[in-house]
Every structure is written in C-alpha cells, then in structure tokens.
Amino acid sequence: MVCISEAQIGKTAGLTATQRLAALPPRQTISYRNGRLTYREAGSGPTLVLLHGLLGSADSWVWQMQDLAARYHVVAWDAPGYGGSDAVEADLDTFADALDTLLRHLNTKDVTVLGHSMGGVISTYTATRPGTPINRLILSCTHGGYAEDPNSPPTQKLLQRMKDLEILGGEAYGRSRAEGMVTPSASPDVIDLAARIAAQTRPQGLFNATRALQLADARPLYARLTIPTLVIFGAEDQVVRPELSEELRRLTPFAQHVVLPGVGHAPYLEDPAAYTGAITAFLETHAHAES
C-alpha cells in the first residue's frame, strides 16, 4: 500500500496537468487468467475503489487520489484494455471478472466501489454477484447499458470513433473528445488534463469496452442491490443522454441521488471539491454498512 502524507499532497498544488499526472503513485500489476491488471494505490483506511469511463484510466482520479488518500485507502484501476491492463473480450461479465480479481487481491471484506460511466455498469454487474465484498456503491454519470442483441454489428458511432482515433492519433483524438465531455465554461487546465488522460486511450481497449456496453443490460440488476447506493449526475452531462439518466433515476429509487451543478461528464475533474464532497458525505453516513 502506497501512503501519501498530507505534506506530499500539499506539494501538488499549482502543478500543470503533466506534473500532476507525474505525481500520481506508480502503477502496480497483478496477474490473473486474462493477463495483467494494473492499478494505482494511495492512502490508508476504509477501501475505496475507483473505476473510470471509456476515455479514462487510473489517471482520471488525480484529484480524488490527492484529496481522499488522507482518510481512505484509494485504489484506481485501469480497466482491461486501458493503462497497463491487458484487453479482454467485449463482455461485461469478463470485465466484472477482472474487478473481482482486483477485489480479491485487495483482500478486504468491506469496500466501496465508485463506477463512473462505463465503470458504473461494471460495478453494478459486480456488486450483484454472490459473495461480493462490495458494501457500498457509487454510480457516477452512468446508465444501464444499451442492451442490443449480441448478434448486432458494432455501431457506426463506434466504427467512426475507431477511424478518428486512427487518423487523428491519440493526442488530437483525446483533445477532441475531452472538449465534448466537459461544459463550455470548463477551464483550459481542466480540458488539458482531460485531454491528456483521453490521449492514452488504446484502440483495442476502446473498441472492446464500447462494444461490451453496446451489449450490456444492467437494468434487471438494480432491483437486486441491497447495499447503500449513491447516484451522482452532472447537471450538464451531454455524454449520457438525458433519457438514460432519467431511466437510472427511476430504476434506483432506493438510492441517494445527487445532481452536481455546472458540470458535464467529468465532474471529478470539473469540480473535484463538490464531487469529492459528495463521496465523503456518503461514506461518512454509511461508514458501518453491512453486506
């Protein structure tokens, strides 16, 4: 476990995007039947596992690893096909298998999992499995999947994104996609940070994860959730369609719902204080949740 002191955390104030990313704790690697799985780890205390979205990685949580490591054991994974993690087949159950592997490796009976966008679907699949150590769930700017027929072809939108990534290259593609994730009022620093993270996207990882979401359907699973659950929405999120956000509200009447104003699809970068505040308040309220 990598521990970061408050003094070390304070030293990251005012850094550029490049410097801030470089200040993250080093990636660690575990091996399992589908290859390598990498993650970053900081702090001590109750375990909080962070799952990024389609254009993210463990680096997405640069602010949360800084702000929460003084009170929590924060673990940010690279989903299969992202960061240093090997790609897996385009199936949400296989992604959930990878998360199960990480949770077993952490060897804790009490864990909170936060899943953002794609990560929210993965975390829902995993949290409803028998014997899971997940005792609290945070769903961030996510949805229930697109539930298309397994025999349906990849969408034209996915094929176009793959073409764009090939033609533009990682850096230009990352910047173009980052600008669509955040609000028009987002600062250049926020856009730069989001772009640098998105620029790391690997073609195979993007294809398999997007295809898995195309086929996934978490809707029947929400009714099986019996653990404390927080659902976070970005008031100006243009990535998750409004009808999908509204559907998630209807499907999670048991959960606490929080709408963060003035942010789009990357509230963890756009307003990290409000985002981290919502997480902390939820964790404090449900500090002794039982599985």
Image: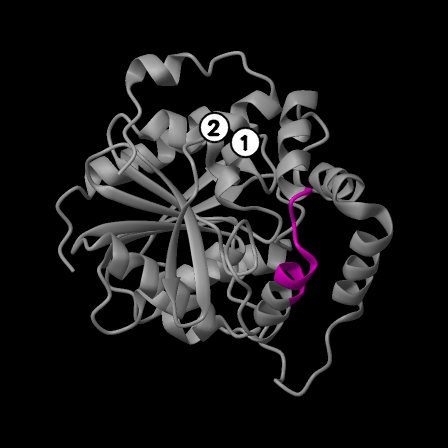
Location of residue 273 with respect to 166 vertically, above or below: above
Image quadrant occupied by the C terminus: bottom left
- Compared across the picture, whether 270 is left or right of 112 comes to right
Compare residues 112 and 89 and report the one nearer the observer.
Answer: 89
- The residue that disc 2 covers is 272
Q: Which mark is residue 65?
A: none
Magenta part of the protein: which range?
A: 199-207
Location of residue 202 with respect to 144 vertically, above or below: above
Q: What kind of element bears circle 1?
A: helix
Instruction: Please state the horizontal and vertical placement of residue 59, each as a whole percent of the image.
Output: 51, 38
Identify the residue at image location x=20%, y=70%: 131
Identify the residue at image location x=65%, y=22%: 189
- The residue that disc 1 covers is 269
Give the quadrant of residue 90. Answer: bottom right
Compare residues 119 and 248 and report the one nearer the observer.
Answer: 119
Give the quadrant of residue 103. Answer: bottom left
Looking at the image, can residue 218 be seen? no
Q: What kind of element bears circle 2?
A: helix
